[in-house]
């Protein structure tokens, strides 16, 4: 995976020549990998392309980076224990949309569809999707390294 930050040129920031070729990031969570084929089919129906997928068990440190936005909330520790409890699948996706917000929103709707149908509870749910493009980059880097 390419680095998205650069220290070249005048100051620090995004180097548009090095921006990644994906605009969405999802995780299929432990215990729900059986839905992977259905999720990929839905992504394809929505004209998304899976650029990279990887199965792994997250370390506590990786999970803490991905779920940093929830640090300090009552469910945080339970979420970290759950997401590190077994294998999950991370996917980088390319959307058909010209703007990143449409990609993020469409993935959020897909996530909610699966959560409503198959989740056990608010913590033990089917999938995670990033809620902003900045988080896509940050979370994908934590997952894929």
Image (cartoon, rainbow, N blue to C red):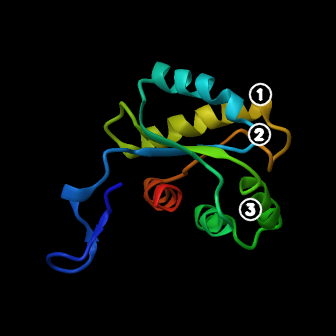
Closer mark to the observer between disc 1 and disc 2: 2
In primary-sequence order, the first of circles 1 and 2 is: 2
Residue on which disc 1 sits: 117
**Callout 2 secondary element:** loop
Assess whether mark 1 and mark 3 are in contact (beta carbons under 8 angstroms).
no
| 92 over 17 or under it: above or below | above
Question: Dot 3: few (<14), some (14–19), or many (≥20) neighbours within 10 Å?
Answer: many
Residue at the image position 48 percent from the left and 55 percent from the top: 144
Residue on which disc 3 sits: 80
| 37 over 18 or under it: above or below | above
**Callout 1 secondary element:** helix
Closer mark to the observer between disc 2 and disc 3: 2
Residue at the image position 49 percent from the left and 53 percent from the top: 132
Question: Dot 2: few (<14), some (14–19), or many (≥20) neighbours within 10 Å?
Answer: some
Question: Dot 1: few (<14), some (14–19), or many (≥20) neighbours within 10 Å?
Answer: few
Query: Furthest-left residue in view?
Result: 9
* Nearer to the camera, 131 or 27: 27
Question: Residue 130: x, y in percent?
Answer: 54, 50
Q: Which mark is residue 31?
A: 2
Label 2, label 3: how far apart the Cα atoms are: 15 Å
């Amino acid at each position: 995976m390419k680095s998205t930050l650069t220290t070249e040129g005048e100051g620090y920031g995004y180097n548009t020549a090095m921006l990644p070729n994906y605009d969405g990031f999802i995780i299929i969570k432990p215990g729900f990998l059986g839905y992977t084929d259905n999720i990929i089919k839905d992504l394809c129906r929505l004209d998304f392309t899976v650029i990279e997928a990887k199965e792994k068990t997250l370390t506590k440190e990786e999970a803490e980076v991905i779920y940093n936005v929830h640090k300090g909330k009552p469910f945080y520790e339970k979420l970290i224990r759950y997401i590190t409890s077994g294998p999950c699948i991370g996917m980088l996706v390319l959307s058909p949309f010209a703007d990143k917000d449409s990609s993020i929103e469409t993935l959020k709707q897909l996530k909610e569809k699966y959560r409503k149908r198959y989740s056990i509870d608010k913590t033990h749910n089917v999938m995670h999707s990033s809620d902003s493009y900045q988080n896509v980059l940050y979370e994908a880097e934590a997952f894929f390294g």
